[in-house]
Amino acid sequence: MKHKGTKLAYLSALLNAVIIGFSFLFAKMALDYADPMDTLTYRFALSFAVMSIPVMFGRVTLNYRGKPLSKLLLLALMYPLGFFTLQTFGLQQATSSEGGILYATTPILTMVLASVFLKESTTVLQKLSIFLSVFGVVFIFMMKGTGIDWTNIQGISLLFLSCLAFAGYGVMARSLLRTFSPAEISYLMLGIGFVTFLVISLTDHVTTGTLDQFITPLTSSTFIVSTLYLGVISSLLTSLLANYALSKIEASNMSVFSNLSTIVSITAGSLFLREEITIYSIIGSVLIIAGVVGTVFWGQKKT
């Protein structure tokens, strides 16, 4: 039964990566109609509302009584609040390619934090596999002719901190899942994200006298469809999948799957935006897959 649960956890991690990979496409579409903070508000409002339905009807049971809610609030501070806020402001000063390169380092950061705080150990071959998957992502971006402009230290620093926040979330969630269920963590995270982004967004619109712009995106069917994907699938479902996976497998093993999102986003760009798939994209994708498979394989050998 334990082996079955582990296989389901890896399947959840894989599906999580696929969904996130397509989310870049839908986020790009949504941002044509609304600014980043408004998009985040609608995204988390929808995800929180959808999850509230089974909670209200008793299909999903939540029990926070006697549990360390302060730690759960700290978790939400790292993700979604810290991650999305730092990423949004970082991308205002840096390029999306720089964001992609830095995001690829998240598995390394997770491995280090998991080793320090969770005492998770990884073999030399696991470490090499994780580095291989990271190199695959960096290789794709570098061969596109994009790199990191180290003179833009503020934007790079914010993007790095967003990756650190996401890595911290994975490690802390792994620890808290011994006390909270995946649904309990996801519901509070989504609720806090919704309230926080709503307050920030409305405050900004009221201050600038642009409240009408907060409602305008709802007249676009493209924005609505994009938000449905981002809210229900890319926020709610991925939260549940990630938290379930973290309850069964080590944080370092879970995090390496995030680099598969790069392959999915390249495929989505080719299918829907007619973007070219180059030979270096294929080589980088092979390196990413080899790194993920190696991490999982050597991790199972360790146990």
Image (spheres, grey):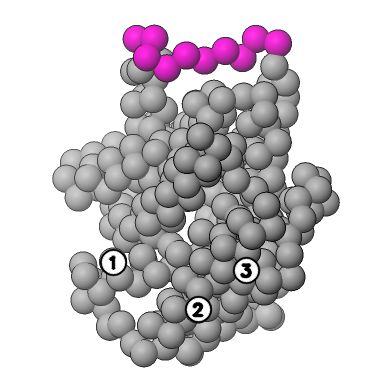
- Asked if one can make out residue 138 in the rendered structure from this viewpoint, the answer is yes
Residue range of the region highlighted in magenta in the rendering: 56-66
The residue that mark 1 highlights is 268
Question: Residue 16: x, y in percent?
Answer: 43, 50
- Asked if one can make out residue 41 in the rendered structure from this viewpoint, the answer is no
Between the residue at mark 2 and the residue at mark 3, the CA separation in whole angstroms equals 10 Å
Question: Residue 36: x, y in percent?
Answer: 43, 51
Q: Per the image, is 59 magenta?
A: yes
303, above or below 270, in the image? above
Question: Which amino acid lies under the numbered mark 1 shown in the image of this protein?
Answer: Ala
- Which label belongs to residue 130? 3
181, above or below 154, in the image? above
Between the residue at mark 1 and the residue at mark 2, the CA separation in whole angstroms equals 19 Å
Residue 253, quarter of picture: bottom right
Circles 3 and 1: CB atoms closer than 8 Å: no
Q: Per the image, is 214 magenta?
A: no
Position of 249 compared to 154: left or right?
A: left
Q: What residue appears at the point 23 percent right and 42 percent down from the top-left corner?
A: 224
Q: Residues within 10 Å of mark 2 (few under 14, many from 20)?
A: many
Question: Residue 184: x, y in percent?
Answer: 54, 23
Disc 1 vs disc 2: which is toward the camera?
2
The residue that mark 2 highlights is 287
Circles 1 and 2: CB atoms closer than 8 Å: no
